[in-house]
Amino acid sequence: MTEPLIIEEIKNGNNTQLAEIYKAYRSEFVGWASSHYQCDKEEARDIYQASIITLYDNIINEKLQQLNGSVKTYLFAIGKNKIMELRRADKKFDLSREIEDIDVADEIDEEKLQKEKHLKIVQHCLQKLGEPCRTMLELYYYHETGLDSLAEMLHYKNGDTVKNLKSRCLLRLRELVTEELKKH
């Protein structure tokens, strides 16, 4: 099927095309991300899932209407951008640890304010996230509900299914939080 038809099929709700894209490039993406960006395989898989979600969102929201290259090229570019975002966030995190050591007394007050601000942003983004992600993440992180219990409560096949969905939900939450933090 040609690239424009694939986009149109996904836009019209044919998730079979999306599933085929997911299966077709997953292994190659994981290998590529691992070798080019030193991601471990689990991190590369998580980034790939987030990239698939972004591809889908871009098609549904009509941000992607026409491809100049292949779906694979577009998907890998999304993945590369997500990897770079994570690396930048890691550097910011490392930098914040170094700054903490400079002036501990003032930093504790500032850190407390930042944590409160960050917590409010996370709570806001959690509300924006929607269902079933919001409920799943709240039960897992706030109420420490296990994966198998979540599967039973939320009517999923098993804990592995919940683990995969939780991973995708958490990545989406991270994206929302990152966007909100850039605004502030």
Image (spheres, grey):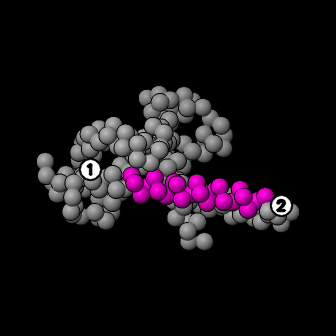
Q: Is residue 89 magenta?
A: yes
The residue that disc 1 covers is 72
Specify the amino acid type for callout 1: Lys
Q: Which residue is mark 2?
A: 104
Image location (x, y in percent) of residue 79: 39, 52
Neighbour tally class for label 2: few under 14, some 14-19, many 20 plus, Cα within 10 Å: few
Out of 86 and 46, give the one closest to the viewer: 86
Prevailing SS of the magenta stretch: helix
Question: At which x and y percent is residue 61?
Answer: 33, 63
Estimate how packed mark 1 is, as few (under 14), some (14 to 19) or many (20 or more) residues with alpha carbons within 10 Å: some
Question: What residue is at 31 percent from the left and 65 percent from the top?
Answer: 63
**Does 75 sit left or right of 37 as displayed?**
left
Is 11 in front, or is 96? 96
Compared with residue 48, is residue 147 higher up or lower down, i.e. above or below?
above
The residue at the point 79 percent across, 62 percent down is: 102
Q: Is residue 119 left or right of residue 104?
A: left
| Residue name at image x 47 percent, y 43 percent | 39
Q: Is residue 69 magenta-colored?
A: no
- Helix, strand, or loop for circle 2? helix
Q: Residue furthest right?
A: 105
- Whether residue 155 is visible: no
Q: Is residue 167 visible?
A: yes
The magenta-colored residue range is 79-101
Q: How many marks?
A: 2
Point out the residue furthest to the left here. Answer: 1
The answer to which quarter of the image holds residue 5 is: bottom left
